[in-house]
Image (cartoon, grey):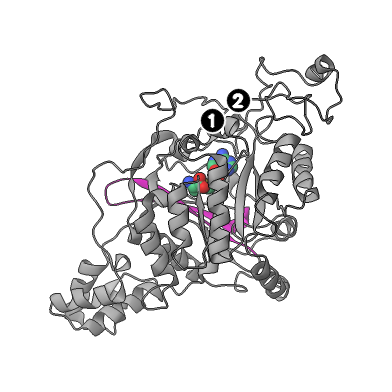
Amino acid sequence: MSPSKNPRPEPASSAPKQGSARRAAGQPAAERGPGGPAGQPTGRAVDSSRPQIRPKAEGWKQPMDAEGRPKLQFAQPKVKQPPQHLADMTLDERIAKAKELGISGFRAKQLSVHYFRHYTADPDQMTDLPAETREQLVEEFLPPLLTEVRRLKTDDGATIKFLWRLFDGALVESVLMRYRSRITLCISSQCGCGMNCPFCATGQNGLTRNMSSAEIVDQIVQANRAIAAGELDAPNAAEVAEEKDHAALGEETDFAESEESAAAGKSASSSSSAGVGPQRVSNIVFMGMGEPLANYKRVMNAVRRMVDPAPEGLGMSARGITISTVGLVPAIRKLADENLPITFALSLHAPDDELRDQLIPVNSRWKADEAIDAAHHYYKTTGRRVSIEYALIKDMNDHQWRAELLAEKLNARGRGWVHVNPIPLNPTPGSIWTSSEPEVMRAFVNRLEALGVPTTLRDTRGKEIDGACGQLAAAED
Ligand code: SAH
């Protein structure tokens, strides 16, 4: 990570200097008092010594709508769609298509085994298929969707960021991370993103188009191919030690499961070889490029392919799949009714609408409370504990009173239904913002814990290769 990517500017001059506001207000830092300069509600600890930085796009121009609010793009522009692929279809649909082509339905099944079990689209390897139909089957069912442009490795080879070019030249990224007892792939669901969050690199160029179900799934198949070829190394001792302190992406949301796999990982960690542990992607996080719930139909069809047993799909566990959203409330409620035990994560980042309106532009449609209600509904409907994502941004959203307000809002809806995952903000090009100081992060986590909210600071892999959350912007250079 180059220093220029992570500037640590002084707080904006309009913000009160350390200590001066406290003196002006005549109060100790954590005293309960009237609303402070940041406009925080009364009756809560007022961090009056802490500046309040307001979100501001720096180094790029945030597109605005006619009313002067950050522009939101829900519908994709009218552009050509990728060719249909085996992974877009159910097995029955594949069989029907094969028959239409005058080929036995059984061939569609064999082809599915090649793709979902052996991760191959190469006709030469399909020796169980008659030579004369192989080429035709591959042409009809397995058009190339993702062409690898570049791959970057970090964490001693335990993290790989892939840059893919799609059929129309659009670029997307996915990030593959091997942990002790799981392999997580962070996948993209849209080319670009229409949600326009000022701290996230992906939204800076708006939404190009939705990805097709097969483009989403092919990220996993290609990652599995790389793993099978031995290209993803085991985490080194330092990474493993780090894992013991911080939850991995997608791990923290399923306590029972993570304890189980931690136990399983004990034996695995006795060896440093990449040959121990899963040999394919075990966990998916929709935390790459795009807003998955703005591409609902294709994302859900892709999820079906992930969980369908082979050869219909990849046969993955739904519990290992995490869908993360800015908070599209009607779609969250729809997701709750899908009857799939997938893990749900809400990118909250601020408990108060005043700040969230600026940090997450979609908050102009659905307020923080509505988004939290929808997350709670998800829990009530599925029984799955949900996750609240909270990128800690220095002097912006990391105040003690915000930890308290967050705890108050979550506890008001019950106990045991939610888990908070703060993550240090990752630097993005042009951003003047920076991650909270370690002691401020600790204090934030401790406050939530003290108020009875399970909280885990999240591990953020891939920063050095701009592969961490919010850093995916998919440029060729
Ligand atoms: N659109 C979805 C998923 C993609 S982003 C969503 O917003 O949830 C995945 C996560 O990374 C989200 O929680 C998002 O808010 C977070 N994120 C974005 N930019 C970030 C940054 N610069 N540092 C840390 N996390 C960031």
Quarter of the figure that contains the C terminus: top left
Which of the 4 image quadrants contains residue 351? Answer: top right
Q: Amino acid at mark 1?
A: Gln
- Residue on which disc 1 sits: 358
Give the magenta-colored segment's residue range. 155-179
Q: Estimate how packed mark 1 is, as few (under 14), some (14 to 19) or many (20 or more) residues with alpha carbons within 10 Å.
A: some
Q: Amino acid at mark 2?
A: Arg
Q: Tell me: 350 left or right of 129.
A: right
Q: Quick check: can you spot residue 282?
A: no
Q: Secondary structure at mark 1?
A: helix
- Residue on which disc 2 sits: 54
Residue under the image location 31 percent in, 72 percent down: 90
Residue labelled 2 has its Cβ within 8 Å of some atom of ligand 1: no
Q: Tell me: 161 left or right of 73.
A: right
Residue under the image location 29 percent in, 68 percent down: 89
- How many numbered badges does the structure rendering display? 2
